[in-house]
Amino acid sequence: MTDTDLIDEAVAILARGGLVAFPTETVYGLGADAQNPVAVRRIFAVKGRPAQHPLIVHVASAAELPRWVTDVPPAAVELARRFWPGPLTLVLHRSPRIPLEVTGGLETVALRVPAHPVAQELLRRFGGAIAAPSANRFGSVSPTTAQHVRDDLGDAVDMVLDGGPCDVGVESTIVDLSGPEPALLRPGGIAREALQHALGVPLRQPSAPSVRAPGQHPLHYAPRAQVILVEPPRIVAEALRLEQAGRHVGVLLPPGVTLPENFGGVALPVPLSLELYAHELYSLLRDFDRRNCDVIVAALPPEEGLGAAIADRLRRAAGPRRRGARSRP
Ligand code: AMP
Ligand code: MG
């Protein structure tokens, strides 16, 4: 647990408009005082994130909701009661206390109460709201350890609070409660099934991906290596084909699948449960980069529970790349 002096220092940095990276149970966040537009603009600059992509605002408890939104619908009360603190983000109508810099110009705001004890303590002592996207450069793999943050952002952040590896390992589930029906904007740490059970209605899936939602950006969560998704039975053949073509191949190897002795690439086993897989996913992707793989072959897990979030991140990691984007340093 981070000692309280460090948290006090982090609070002082936030209060003077600085940036603090801090652990949450999902991934590490890059935090700024949500009510300070200058500080918030620095988040976008450091991440290289387009200004219209809204940030998630973190608050200490559900009791804070009326301070930051104009109305709290019954569905928000119910989901907050069941899942906060936890990996669930709710989109509601913003109060004027939330500057438009935070919301990318939208009249709605995404709010979450994180469960990590360091995040909780930071929020309680700060007393305000902390705007925080993942503490990595825009589009790349989210950080799940303090070292990942230092690797990605170095001196660009004023302080990194180290709370150990993140428990959940993938981002929060985002539910939009600002419209007539609740909609699932991004699968994440809380399963769709659990949310639907709590709400008693199905969650609408937005049909067209919204530009407003970075989690919905076609290429996101991506390692440097190209990611190729195949059906599980084709993993071995695809890995060998790419190796023969001269590539340095990484394989996310599902249980029970084996590669021939002469395979010269990097095979990392898929963890045995969906919980462990989510927990390890981003570290595995970073491992392939560290070992200089230029392509990663993977299959999607079953899309139930946490599997939906893992599959979503793998699909986006395999998404279309802009020419020149994410080339090797
Ligand atoms: P990130 O912090 O990069 O993991 O992503 C923040 C996520 O918050 C994005 O995926 C957006 O979908 C979501 N988000 C934040 N604010 C809003 C909003 N007002 N409306 C819809 N989505 C939002
Ligand atoms: Mg992110």
Image (spheres, rainbow, N blue to C red):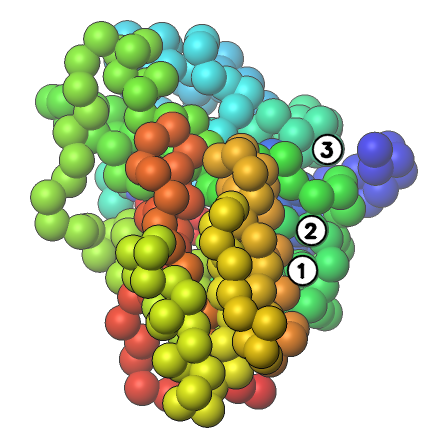
Could you tell me if the residues under marks 1 and 2 are in contact, i.e. CB atoms within 8 Å? yes
Label 3 crowd (10 A; few <14 / some 14-19 / many >=20): many
Q: Quadrant of the N terminus?
A: top right
Task: Give the mark nearest the N terminus, 3 or 2.
Answer: 3
Query: Residue under circle 1?
Result: 148
Q: Residues within 10 Å of mark 2 (few under 14, many from 20)?
A: many
Dot 1 amino acid type:
His
Along the polypeptide, which appears first: circle 3 or circle 1?
Answer: 3
Q: Disc 1 on helix, strand or loop? A: helix
What numbered label is drawn on residue 118?
Answer: 3
Image quarter hosting the C terminus = bottom right
**Does residue 23 appear in this view?**
yes
Q: Which mark is residue 145?
A: 2
Q: Is residue 204 left or right of residue 92?
A: left
Q: Residue at x 11, y 49 (%)?
A: 208
The alpha-carbon separation of the residues under discs 1 and 2 comes to 5 Å
Residue nearer the viewer, 114 or 39: 114
Given residues 325 and 75, the one toward you in this image is 325
Determine the residue located farthest toward the bottom in the rendered image: 246
**Amino acid type, residue under disc 2 in the picture:** Thr
> Mark 3 near mark 1, Cβ–Cβ under 8 Å?
no
Classify residue 43 as left or right of residue 149. left
Which mark is in front, 3 or 1? 1
**Separation (CA) of disc 3 from disc 1:** 17 Å
Is 167 rendered above or below residue 310?
above
Asked if ligand 2 lies within 8 A of label 1, the reply is: no
Vertical comparison of 315 with 206: above or below: below
Q: Amino acid at mark 3?
A: Val
Regarding residue 54, the answer to whether it shows in the image is no
Residue at 46 percent of width and 17 percent of height: 83
Residue 213 is situated, as x and y percent measured from the top left of the image, at 29, 50
